Amino acid sequence: MSVTESGVAEAPRPRRGRPPSVGLAERRREELTDAAFTVFAEQGYEHASVADIAKRAGMGQGTLYRYVEGKRELLDLVFDRCVDELMTAIAPDRVVDVTASGDLAAAEEMVEGVAGRLFGLVDSRPDILKVVMVQSGTVDEELRFRIQGLYQTFDSMMGRALGHARELGWIVTRTEHPETETVHLGRLLPALGVPGLVMALTAGDDPERRRDYVRAAVRMSASGILSGEARAALPPLAPSGEEAPAEPDAAAPVPVAGRSAELLDAAIAEFVEKGYAAVGVREITERAGVSHGTFYNYFDSKRHMLTVLVERNRQAVLGRLDRVVADPPAATVEALQAAVFDLNRDVLQDIAERLDEFRFLALEVPGVDVEAFDTYLVLYREAASRFEEILGGALAVGLLHESLGIGDIAEVWLGYMLGTAAAMVSDVDVTSPAESARVVTNLLLGGARTL
């Protein structure tokens, strides 16, 4: 500002050129966050470049760096936005408040509302779970800690909600540890949403199918899959420690053995300790005690090992199911209960014994190999199909509730198992595989509500 000879302040002259745009920086960061989300989902964080993100946002790299420091900050922005959207859809405070109110009808309506909002979110952002729970978890310890914190927050919310439900007499516990069982139920019931989310990812054009599934899932969570007469005849499962674990030679077949298996085991140990990106063929061969030449007799590359590793575990999981399909349970409530419990226990025991490997498969592999996520969706369908076969005898003699489709039942079972596995790999599960299997079996067959 200048002063005239008369001493009157003179207004500053307007600057030439385009006036500054109000909110431009915020809009640019939003555009970059949108672009980063898409590129991370398509390519994976490891392979995405700043140039790719800038190009997707329609700006140069130099412009990008005016608004963000780089790719890592963009992942933080993507993560924060996705978490905000997920928490808005779930509305955790309302879940607890409605449950505490004692209004059962309102609670059931609330469950369907949460499901509808989650499916709507996945419809609009099909890759949101992959980016939040998979891509982000492969980057560094800080983000893995934030993901674990998100899981624990949700876990705590469900525990409080079901604690209120138990006090109100809405749910029944069937083990000798009711508080622990309630905590476990809090991890299983949200997993009922997994099949619906898979539907949204693979068949998003059929919202009516998902609504039908939600209604069936709510019914199953309350009363289980058995008909009224069969449910009344359901015997209690043996208390902890009374059932014998599977014999070692009863383990599911693993298709990779010998030197290949040794190399895979060495690679897993290295990946778990140092992270996939920091490990090379040299580290793997040194741990396995073999030469480079020996490595290339079995694998084309480190990346090839991931494909073989995923397939090894796919065959192990399906092998457990195929054993029951080949020797189906007799068409009685007791036989069905025993077969489902044994299957659940053996699968969860496999995970417990190779927890580092499953953690790597669940949390890191899909972030390294974008095709792995699609492979897991195929495995999901294969496992559900096998479980339908296991239920065939029970369906034929009328043990299953007539209002339920066998496909929905199989997906609910798979959702419960995935919910338990997620707790195990996230280090929040506090029960043994047998105890977890007991809770899953009781909930699947008899539901959570009193008779």
Image (cartoon, rainbow, N blue to C red):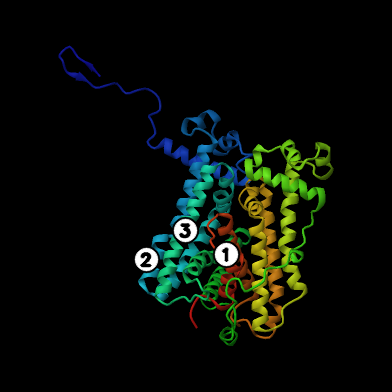
Q: Which residue is mark 1?
A: 196
Label 1, residues with CA under 10 Å away: few <14, some 14-19, many ≥20: many
User: Closest to the observer: 34 or 301?
Assistant: 301
Asked which secondary structure carries label 3, the reply is: helix
- Disc nearer the start of the sequence (3/1): 3
User: Closest to the observer: 306 or 404?
Assistant: 306
At x 45%, y 72%, the residue is 108
Which x, y percent locates residue 190?
52, 64
Q: Quadrant of residue 325?
A: bottom right
Q: Is residue 402 above or below residue 140?
A: below
Q: Which residue is mark 3?
A: 154
Label 3, residues with CA under 10 Å away: few <14, some 14-19, many ≥20: some
Q: Describe residue 334's horizontal placement relative to residue 443 as left or right.
A: right
At x 62%, y 62%, the residue is 203
From mark 3 to mark 1, how far is it between C-alphas?
19 Å
- Disc nearer the start of the sequence (3/2): 2
Q: Which residue is mark 2?
A: 97
Q: Is residue 354 above or below residue 347?
A: above
> Mark 3 is on which residue type?
Phe
Which x, y percent locates residue 303?
73, 43
